Amino acid sequence: MADIDPLVLLTIASATAREAGALLLARRGLVHDVTTKTSDTDVVTEVDRDAEALIVSRILGLRPADAVLGEEGGGHPGTSRVRWVIDPLDGTVNYLYGRDEFAVSIAAEVDGVAVAGAVFAPATDEIFEAALGHGATLNGAPVRPTPETRLTHALVGSGFAYDAAVRVTQGRVAARVIPRIRDLRRAGSAALDVCAVACGRLDAYYERGVHAWDIAAASLVVREAGGMAESLDGTPPGGTTIWIASNAGLAPEFRALVTEASTEP
């Protein structure tokens, strides 16, 4: 990896995320083409697709040999050791409803390992950035997770699938988790939820079925901030995998709680 500088990749990720975020803000309230993906409530807009096209164009314009994995299908196979994992609009429903919890997420992987990541929240002008071995920042200032070690005092974030049957299961898990923690929050953007753990706005987070593009950049931000982000079973994100993040002190007990809550009949 010595020949690939994570800070150079981070510069590309951050600048591109800001440019895509500006596009999202400029089109806010003007979206008319809304379609669905996995269910009637899982929406995608022309803004998602246009933002992804912009991101792919900028990245490949600078690094044409790299691979790209995009949520809206804007992929590119690539021939280098670098792959970009992008979500052009995480929190599309929030965006459509005029809420501020939406973000652009861009991560760069080298040989399958995330080495740079940027998560930009255009509505609040906040950018979370991380490069492997260089720490994590929010608008340029270093961030750290909370020091909380008491699970009963933990503020936990989560999210729910767009499939009704999956939501039933997730509701059962949430019902088992809530009595053991301070409270549960659902903001509607996995990328921002995971970044919230990194900067102390949440103590921990869990969610079933998030995809790589949802959390690739944010998970690097948490790890570089000093926290934990991983799947419960060691498998990649997606499908039925449950992704968790927390500060270091809560990690063992929180991991055990989510494991117990998700495996009970």
Image: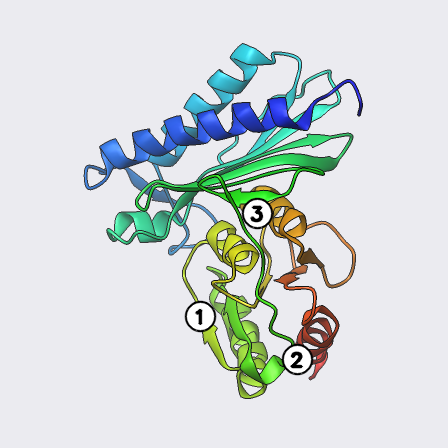
Considering every residue shown, the one lying at the far front of the view is 141
In the rendered image, which residue does mark 2 sit on? Answer: 261
Q: Give the amino acid at mark 3.
A: Ala
The numbered mark at residue 55 is none
Would residue 165 be seen by someone viewing this image from the given angle?
Answer: yes
Residue type highlighted by circle 2: Ala
N-terminal of the pair, mark 1 or mark 2, is 1
Q: Residue at x 46, y 25 (%)?
A: 16
Residue that mark 1 sits on: 185
SS under mark 3: helix
Instruction: Please identify, in this view, whether the residue under mark 2 or under mark 3 is nearer the observer.
Output: 3
Badge 3 crowding class, 10 Å Cα cut-off, few under 14, some 14 to 19, many 20 or more, is many
- Is residue 14 rendered to the left or right of residue 233? left
196 shown above or below 139: below
Q: Position of residue 30 (x, y in %)?
A: 19, 37
Figure quadrant of residue 234: bottom right
Rate crowding at label 1 as few (under 14), some (14 to 19) or many (20 or more) other CA atoms within 10 Å.
few
Query: Relative to residue 178, is residue 232 drawn left or right?
Result: right
Q: Amino acid at mark 1?
A: Arg
Nearer to us in this view, 260 or 72: 260
Marks 1 and 3 sit apart, C-alpha to C-alpha, by 17 Å
Asked whether the residues under the numbered discs 1 and 3 touch, taking CB atoms below 8 Å apart as contact, a structural biologist would say no
Q: Earlier in the sequence, mark 1 or mark 3?
A: 1
Circle 2 packing at 10 Å, graded few (<14), some (14-19), many (20+), is some
- Helix, strand or loop under label 1: strand
Tell me the distance, in whole angstroms, between the alpha carbons under discs 1 and 2: 17 Å
Q: CA distance from mark 2 to mark 3?
A: 24 Å
Tell me where residue 87 appears, x and y as whole percent: 50, 38
SS at circle 2: helix
Would you name the residue on which mark 3 appears? 218
- On the rendered image, what quadrant is the C terminus found in? bottom right
